[in-house]
Amino acid sequence: MKTKKQQELIELYLSQLEGEKRTIYRELIEYLSELGYNPKKEGQRISFKHDMHRKQIAKIGMTKGKQPRPIFMLRFSACQDYSERFKDIVNKAVSKDNFNEARCINNNCNWCAGDAVSHVYIGSSSDGAQKFHCGASALEIPDVKAEDILEIKRLLKEEHIYLMKNEAGVESENLL
């Protein structure tokens, strides 16, 4: 249940959107709320975290400039099965020169609980090399459309179950 301040924050954000975009983002925000993720203003964006593990699972915001557009960022690093669209997002992320390399693969980080390979993004860079991107990062899902909603919800639920089990110590059968 969102507080009045959280509800006002969401409504202010949604008021910047029109038509289908407002409907899409409202549905995603409502699903995040159903899973127990609370909105919190962080700079120019709104971050969604759960009280039981305090890890971010999603972010929303607007781009800057003359024609701002909505941004949706999703943490789905613990998810094992996703469409080519999401594989392309991971591959694009690991292909950047300054990508957020997963230090946990070499035991140089202990931010996330669980086996390192189970919670990092694994992608192929433009030269074909396999690379590991930090799983604590939410990756931008460009131009979210209505047909993306089911997959995003599935990925949110899978990531949520992983975080609740590994970060909050709640068994998955207690989450369904």
Image (cartoon, rainbow, N blue to C red):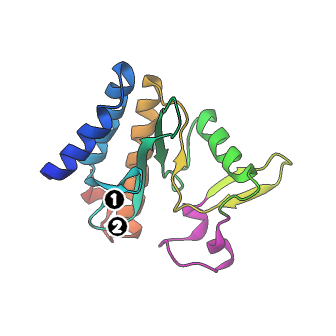
By secondary structure, the bulk of the magenta-drawn segment is best described as loop
Q: Which residue is painted at 21% across and 50% down in the image?
A: 6
Q: Is residue 110 magenta?
A: yes
The alpha-carbon separation of the residues under discs 1 and 2 comes to: 5 Å
* Label 1: which secondary element: strand
Residue 167 drawn above or below residue 67: below
Residue 102 drawn above or below residue 154: below
* Label 2: which secondary element: loop
Quarter where residue 171 is shown: bottom left
Residue 105 drawn above or below residue 95: below
Tag 1 near tag 2, CB within 8 Å? yes
For mark 2, what is the residue? 54
Span of residues in magenta:
101-120
Q: Which residue is painted at 64% across and 80% down in the image?
A: 108
Q: Which residue is painted at 70% across and 51% down in the image?
A: 123
What residue occupies the far right of the structure in this picture?
127
For mark 1, what is the residue? 49
Q: Which residue is painted at 20% across and 44% down in the image?
A: 8
Mark 2 is on which residue type? Arg
What residue occupies the far top of the structure in this picture?
19
What residue occupies the far front of the structure in this picture?
66
